[in-house]
Amino acid sequence: MNTNRFICGDAVVSMRKFPAESVDLIIADPPYNLGKDYGNNLDLKARREYEEFTKTWLAEAVRLLKPSGTIYVFMGVRFISRLFLMMEEEFNLVFNGWITWHYTQGMGRKVGFSPRHEDILYFTKSEVFVFNLDDVRIPQKYYRKRNNMTGANPGDVWQFSHVHYCSAERESHPTQKPEALIERMIRASSNEGDLTLDPFVGSGTTCRVAEALRRKWVGIDLNPKYVEMSERRIREKSTLFDSVDPRVARTPRDLPKEEQADEVENRPAQPALPQGF
Ligand SMILES: C[S@@+](CC[C@H](N)C(=O)[O-])C[C@H]1O[C@@H](n2cnc3c(N)ncnc32)[C@H](O)[C@@H]1O
């Protein structure tokens, strides 16, 4: 299978051409059916039609996953409970986590609470799957002998800021995801050389991060403008991912002052980005 390329086309039609059980990791960020402008009027379907669309692309995604494969699906709150049942009951995937992506800034509401999260469903195809915890640990909150002081499991509430409109990395795409958020998924759920597929690649975030982490990748999008954007982004060099989990800067709270300084100095480095990225 040809990898490290973008395909301009419909996700289902394109995925049907791939061999079964050929993909290690799928990161899918489909339109949430909220009427976003992706250059067409496809993001406002009747509920039943959206369910059908979801089932059709999910069926293909499941066919492509290797038995040891993992799938993460982003979804808005209005449809996530339906999606969860579909993945668990209709596609018999193995539930591994319901991740909440929490952000501190966003649209404000005058009546009702302002939305400050999106969710990500994390499923595997079987009970045997890759999970590289050591590659995604964050510093512990407290010093305890029994704690693993190389770092804690990041948990299932992830805090990454949006890619702000004023940020240098911001692309002209309405739902660009932070690279660091995708980095956590790819590091945790794949190894170097594994194939990552993003069937709704948008501005190309997943593929850009996969390339930097030496994974193989394929990205699909219906809109030729976004495919061009993704192709440009993959060629651009960068030194850092565009968002950080603020907890990586913390030191265990209950260390005496001199040990805190020591801890910062001796903290194991985060896994390094490949040279030149
Ligand atoms: C939520 S956005 C993905 C954003 C992406 N994760 C990023 O970081 O930029 C969904 C994307 O799916 C694309 N899309 C919508 N329907 C599609 C379809 N049937 N096949 C392929 N792509 C589609 C849209 O053009 C849009 O760019």
Image (cartoon, rainbow, N blue to C red):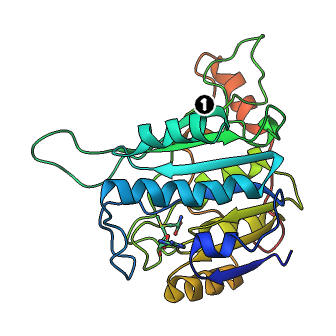
Task: Out of 220 and 226, give the one closest to the viewer.
Answer: 220
Asked whether residue 267 appears in the rendered view, the answer is no
Question: Which residue is disc 1 drawn over?
Answer: 155
Q: Is residue 210 left or right of residue 41?
A: right
Q: Residue at x 60, y 80 (%)?
A: 230
Residue 9 spot, x, y in % from top left: 58, 82
Characterize the local packing of mark 1: few (<14), some (14-19) or many (20 or more) Cα atoms within 10 angstroms: few
Whether residue 58 appears in this view of the structure is yes
Position of 15 compared to 158: left or right?
Answer: right
Rendered residue at 33%/69% (across/down): 36
Between 273 and 77, the one lying in front of the other is: 77
- Residue 61 horizontal/vertical position (percent): 67, 57
Left or right: 232 as drawn, with respect to 104: right
Q: Residue at x 38, y 46 (%)?
A: 79
- Mark 1, ligand 1, within 8 Å: the answer is no
Q: Is residue 100 above or below residue 64?
A: above
Displayed quadrant of residue 133: top right
Taking 64 as reference, is 22 left or right?
Answer: right
From the viewer's side, name the closer residue of 14 and 259: 14
Residue 189 x/y as whole percent: 76, 46
Residue 107: image x %, image y %? 25, 55
Q: Nearer the viewer, residue 137 or 225?
A: 225
Choose top left, top right, bottom left or bottom right for residue 8: bottom right
For the C terminus, the quadrant is bottom right
Where is the N terminus found, in terms of image quarters? bottom right
Q: Residue furthest right?
A: 193
